Amino acid sequence: MPGFSGAPPGVPTILSVTTAVTFTKGLPGGSGGISDTILNGIKIAQNGAAVTVTLTGFRKEDGTAASIVFTGSTTTDTWVPLGWLNTVGPLTVTASVASKVVVETIAAALGP
């Protein structure tokens, strides 16, 4: 990136839907791929009821696919720094409440 020194910044995406959003090479949309997106982190805005975020595309210790759920707070915003590569399938993110979750992603140089 011209004029930028160091690691390139991540791309923030506000999830305005409560359906699954698939990421392809760091951007929302497409069918995704294995090892094509790094999830730098998630911000979950505070809400009257706890907001959950479900992530897929990662593996368990035995190598099989797994999902993980993060839950936000009702009193303060929650930032979850990650730096995870989707090693089993496309990165898919599902928020339980629209417009309360921001994910920061970047394309991975390892992907197809």
Image: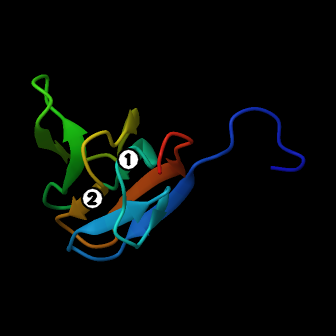
The reply to whether residue 48 is in sight is yes
Residue placed under numbered mark 1 in the picture: 42
> For residue 94, what is the image quadrant?
bottom left
Of residue 77 and residue 90, the one placed in the foreground of this image is 90
> For residue 92, what is the image quadrant?
bottom left
Residue found 15% across the figure and 54% down from its top: 50
Structural crowding at the residue carrying mark 2, measured as other residues with C-alpha within 10 Å and reported as few (<14), some (14–19) or many (≥20): many
Task: Report x, y in % for residue 110.
Answer: 50, 39
Of residue 48 and residue 101, the one placed in the foreground of this image is 101
Of residue 28 and residue 71, the one placed in the foreground of this image is 28
Mark closest to the chain's N terminus, 1 or 2: 1
Say what secondary structure mark 2 lies in.
strand
From this view, report whether residue 61 is shown above or below residue 79. above
Task: Report x, y in % for residue 49.
Answer: 13, 60
Q: How many marks?
A: 2
Task: Report x, y in % for residue 56.
Answer: 21, 50
Task: Report x, y in % for residue 12.
Answer: 52, 58
Say what secondary structure mark 1 lies in.
strand
Q: Give the left or right position of residue 91, taking residue 65 as reference.
A: right
Residue placed under numbered mark 2 in the picture: 93
In space, the residues marked 1 and 2 are separated at their CA atoms by: 10 Å
From this view, report whether residue 59 is shown above or below residue 19. above
Residue found 44% across the figure and 49% down from its top: 36
Q: Residue furthest right?
A: 3
The amino acid type, in three-letter code, at marker 1 is Ile
Q: Are the two marked residues, 1 and 2, in contact with CB atoms closer than 8 angstroms?
A: yes
The amino acid type, in three-letter code, at marker 2 is Val
